[in-house]
Image (cartoon, helix red, strand yellow):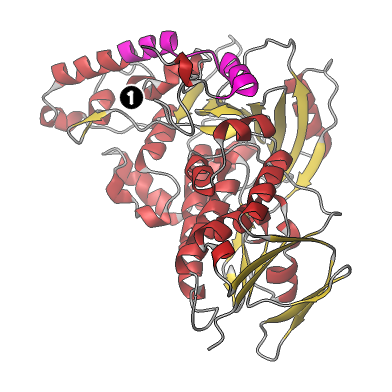
Amino acid sequence: MDRRRRILIVGGGAAGWLTAAYLAKSLRVAEQAHLEITLLESPEVGIIGVGEATFPTIRTTLQFLGVDEARFIRETSATFKQGIRFNDWAWAPRQDGERHQYFHPFEAPFSTDGASLAPYWLLQNEATRAPFAEAMTIQARVADAQRAPKRPHEGNFSGPLNYAYHFDAAKLAQVLAERACELGVRHLQGRLTEVELDATGAIDHVVCAEHGRLEAELYIDCTGFHAELIGKALKAPFKSARPILFADRALACKAPYDRPDAPIQSFTIATAHEAGWIWDIGLKDARGVGCVYSSDHIDDDRAEAILRGYVGHDVEIAPRALTFEAGYRTKQWVKNCVAVGLSAGFLEPLESTGVVLIEAAVAIIAELFPHNGPISAPALRFNELMTARFDNIITFLKLHYCLSQRTEPFWRQNADPASMPERLVDLLEQWRWRPPTRYDFILDLETFAFFNYQYILYGMGFKTDLSPGRSEFPDVAGAEKLFAKIRNFGERATHDLPSHRDLIAQINRFGFDRSLEPA
């Protein structure tokens, strides 16, 4: 029996090279004579790079690939990300200067003996209690103090606090490409000119201007929004999420720091505006800033004015326009072709779901990979898993918008239950009487845990009324001691952890220096 399994990945960028490296490592391609992975990359196609932020899963992925963390940080201009700070989402800045702000940390809320502190926080006096994230974890305090999530002596991917990264997307692709080639991936540069189907409607071969006819058993479409294989050739249907997620445009730019030693925030700043929001992430030498907006609510000129007003009119920027439609392909694996990355779908830059969806897709491909039998055997299960994951992320992203009290049309339409997924409407009704729990979600279909929902709900001021059952939570004194312990640990951590900029400078010069470990 011919067990040959040739995989042809069409498209580079983060999606293509992450897919190539992960499959090469997982399938041990370099050791298997019957397995072959080729990546065809067009030198004419640039990297979109709308998201320069990640989710903590990227650490596990990079570690699995054998990428050194210090080298990764140096070569991608990376910094640490401990969460997201949301400005002005609950309401617009008021005339007296008051602004709303909350933090979504990566750390899970503190708990003891499996018991959650959330009910005790909900039963505290709203006027005097600490913000939810600050009360439940030390990370909010650490990030606000511009401290790093780890120390110089703590090596690859380890540290006391959970974290991800901000990085230059183009440089990430270069690091992944080098690692993929080390793992046995064959790299071709050339322009795709044709996709030929066989009598069954599967891909028979593709044609490249520079290399001619290329054949494989499995084709992976990483051609971005062009979706050359899954969309143009195989006509896989696209399901729009625009009725739920209104944003469809972004203007992205790089902005310099006002001085070389300016603090680097270890979180993404997401600032709401009249028809969307602005991302602001700190890289080593500059900030990545972008204005996300709905073209149904403001025009491009107004969006640029909002972006320039945020950055400062005296700062020179060259905004790059990006157009997208939130949604995904309901069949991302069709016959002998599977889509990964933007070709499979894209929602919006909020919560850094672009890279995490690539990670999820390639992990499933590796786990379900058909070493024997039809190459399309995993298609049904793959499509079920990815469809559920996209739908659940859409629900989570909508949660950020629908709780707002802002009065602009964009925000009022987001608060209309008619624009919400039915599941979200049902969950919000349940959460009026109890906080979200792990039983609300099926782990393998989710990107975000129940506590991620808690951070957004209670950061936005959502009311969960536990007062009728106050007597069912009798250990108030014990809970207060734990809240005090979290505060004390947070204060100690702000003294023990280095500044974020100092740690990035240390890593770029020396890497992680274990000689600095305290005695």
Which residue corresponds to the image point at 72% horizontal and 77% vertical from the top-left? 215
Viewport quadrant of the C terminus = top left
- The majority secondary structure of the magenta stretch comes to helix
Q: For label 1, count other residues whose C-alpha is less than 10 Å away and answer few (under 14), some (14-19) or many (20+).
A: many
Which residue corresponds to the image point at 29% horizontal and 28% vertical from the top-left? 110
SS category of the residue bearing label 1: helix
Q: Is residue 178 above or below residue 320?
A: below
- Closest to the observer: 299 or 32? 32
- Judge left or right: residue 307 versus residue 376: right
| Residue 242 seen in the current view | no
| Magenta stretch encompasses residue 507 | yes
- Closest to the observer: 325 or 236? 236
- Closest to the observer: 233 or 129? 233
Occupied quadrant, residue 285 = top right
Q: Is residue 258 above or below residue 223?
A: above
Q: Residue furthest bottom?
A: 199
Image x and y of residue 292, in percent = 69, 38
- Judge left or right: residue 234 versus residue 21: right
Q: Is residue 206 above or below residue 301?
A: below
Q: Residue furthest right?
A: 209
Q: Which residue is mark 1?
A: 136
- Closest to the observer: 287 or 512? 512
Q: Is residue 33 above or below residue 292?
A: below
Magenta range is 487-511
Image x and y of residue 210, in percent = 88, 67
Amino acid type, callout 1: Met
- Judge left or right: residue 80 versus residue 433: right
Image x and y of residue 409, in percent = 64, 38
Occupied quadrant, residue 130 = top left
